[in-house]
Amino acid sequence: MATDPGVLILSPTGRDAKIAASILASKGIVTHVCSTLAETLPLLDMAQCLVVAEEALLTSDRNPFAAWLESQPAWSDFPIVLLTMRGAEFDERLRFLDRYLIVLERPFLASSLANSVRSALRARTRQLEVKSLLEHKEEVAHRQKLLIRELHHRVKNTLANVRAMMGATARSSSNVDDFVRNFSARLVSLADTHSMLTDDYWQTAFLHKLLETELRHYDTTDRSRILLEGPDVALVADLAIPVGMAFHELASNSSKFGALSWPRG
């Protein structure tokens, strides 16, 4: 049997199942014939439609089938084509089928069966499209929640860094002008690191690029004074920010007091 049974056919007496399968096959519709309702039940989740003779339901335990129909998600109204005897009254014991039911009297024309099943399949296709849309909206909402949570985390960390920088700058500054100059430089350094992280969707910042960004302000002569050697290490966000700030402080101090070097290894 194929993975997708397509249209299930349950008509265990007479030739209805064989005839129905032959008619639908001639229209290019995939079918799977079942012999009992118990055999049909496990296939319902994969099927698109059920063609069933009323006697197959009346002579079986209908409770599991009724429970399956009742437990369908909100987007689903599983289509059923019910084969009845011509002129017979609808049996009240089958009232649980009335959510999406097409009644086809026997003996039926081949065109009547094909049209009924096509109508059921179109309805199921629309239901599955609604399901796909709902799942997509749910996925988008979930991703939005994750992004908001991540943004909240990053904003808190950034504000904590700014507060720490402000305190450190205040302690090391002798006057307001020094404070404004040093604090502004540290904010620019923090902003540069943030720019690298946001360019990579807040994933990583590469060490070479981070160093180039921090040190380019000091390479003001015709001959470059900056030499970077070693592997280009990728730093995750929680490491990139403090590392960037550390190199900013080292470069700033070096410009005032002497050369900056970093040991190889």
Image (cartoon, rainbow, N blue to C red):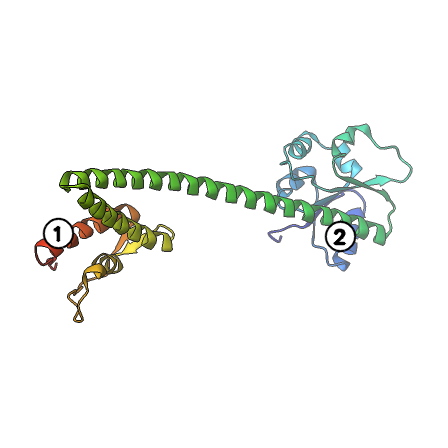
- Which residue sits at x=33%, y=37%? 156
Pick the quarter of the image with the C terminus: bottom left
Closest to the observer: 189 or 97?
Answer: 189
Nearer the observer, disc 2 or disc 1? 1
Q: Image height check: is 194 above or below 155?
A: below
Q: Is residue 17 visible?
A: yes
- Determine which residue is flagged by label 2: 21
Left or right of 160? Residue 261 is: left
Q: Position of residue 239 (x, y in %)?
A: 25, 47
Instruction: Identify the residue position indicated by label 1 in the image.
Output: 253
Element type at mark 1: helix
Q: Describe residue 249's horizontal placement relative to residue 152 as left or right.
A: left
Give the image location of residue 232, x and y in percent.
24, 61
Q: Is residue 219 above or below residue 79?
A: below
Amino acid at circle 1: Asn
Q: Residue at x 38, y 38 (%)?
A: 152
| Amino acid on which disc 2 is placed | Ala
Q: Is residue 200 visible?
A: no
The residues tagged by marks 2 and 1 sit, at their Cα atoms, a distance apart of 85 Å
Q: Position of residue 67 (x, y in %)?
A: 65, 31
Of residues 6 and 193, the one nearer the viewer is 193
